[in-house]
Image (cartoon, rainbow, N blue to C red):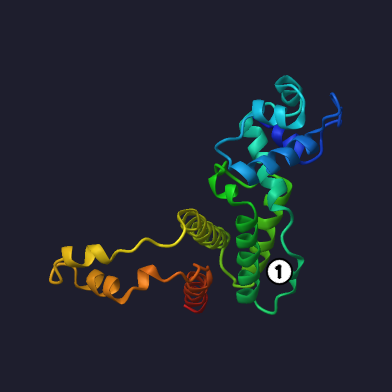
Amino acid sequence: MNDETPSWAAAAWGQRSGQRTEGLSTERIVAAAIELADREGLAGLSIRKLGQHLGAGTMAAYRHVQSREDLVILMVDVALGPPPADIRRAASWQEGLERWASGMSLRYGTHPWLIDAAITGFPATPNKALWLEYVLQVLAATGLDTQRMLDAALLVDGHARNTAYLVRELGRSGAAPSTAWLVPLLDPEQFPQLSRVLVSGELEDETEQTIDFGLARIIAGLEALVDG
């Protein structure tokens, strides 16, 4: 087992000396990278482009972050920020879970590139760890065992993440394209339900997707598990 603290973890938890190079700091580099990602998405982010954005050379940035992967880990933690304090003031675990999911959805909406960031294992940066801590504190009131609490937390976050992805992608494509042309091509006997949906026009409904319906079903399932 390797117990050495990774470089990105040392930076995230403030274990570095804070040495400045050409006016740069890890904090400034991460903040600039978030600005770029908010504007251009995560796919276009590179250390070279970041150095240009900062008016510094690529090597100057590398003195503070060892790789693009390390940079993204730090960006995610800063972009998430700490969870809303009102989660802990919820009157019930159900309400706490709703507040946690709402807070996470807001972060995904504010920084859509978060959806594209790779999931790198256990939440080991300060803010990610705090988000996990908060949801586990909420779920502790259910009496579920640790593994089921972790499963529930993953389920809620996955739902918030998937919903944010749909909202982002539908927003990129603009108004939903008409599917009227498909109706006469479908055999009503083979596609009875799909035909009904297309004729109803519900697929072209521009109502924004929210987490509410799915989250309510997740909570109902947890309630059944708790009461069972």
Residue found at x 65% / y 40%: 73
The percent coordinates of residue 130 (x first, y second) are 71, 55
Give 228 or 61, whichever is nearer the viewer.
Answer: 61
Vertical arrangement, residue 137 with respect to residue 220, above or below: above
Secondary structure of the residue carrying tag 1 is helix
The percent coordinates of residue 12 (x first, y second) are 75, 40
Q: Is residue 81 left or right of residue 223?
A: right
Q: The disc labelled 1 sits on which kind of residue?
A: Ile
Give 31 or 53, whichever is nearer the viewer.
Answer: 53
Q: Is residue 59 left or right of residue 167?
A: right
Give 219 or 145, whichever is nearer the viewer.
Answer: 219
The percent coordinates of residue 79 (x first, y second) are 69, 49
The percent coordinates of residue 151 (x first, y second) are 52, 59
- State how many labels appear: 1
Residue found at x 66% / y 78%: 92
Task: Find disc 1 in the rendering and name its residue.
Answer: 87
Q: Residues within 10 Å of mark 1 (few under 14, many from 20)?
A: many
Give 2 or 55, whichever is nearer the viewer.
Answer: 55
Q: Is residue 38 left or right of residue 202?
A: right
Vertical arrangement, residue 141 with respect to residue 133, above or below: below
Q: Quadrant of the N terminus?
A: top right
**Whether residue 110 is visible:** yes
Vertical arrangement, residue 14 with respect to residue 161, above or below: above
**Whether residue 140 is visible:** no
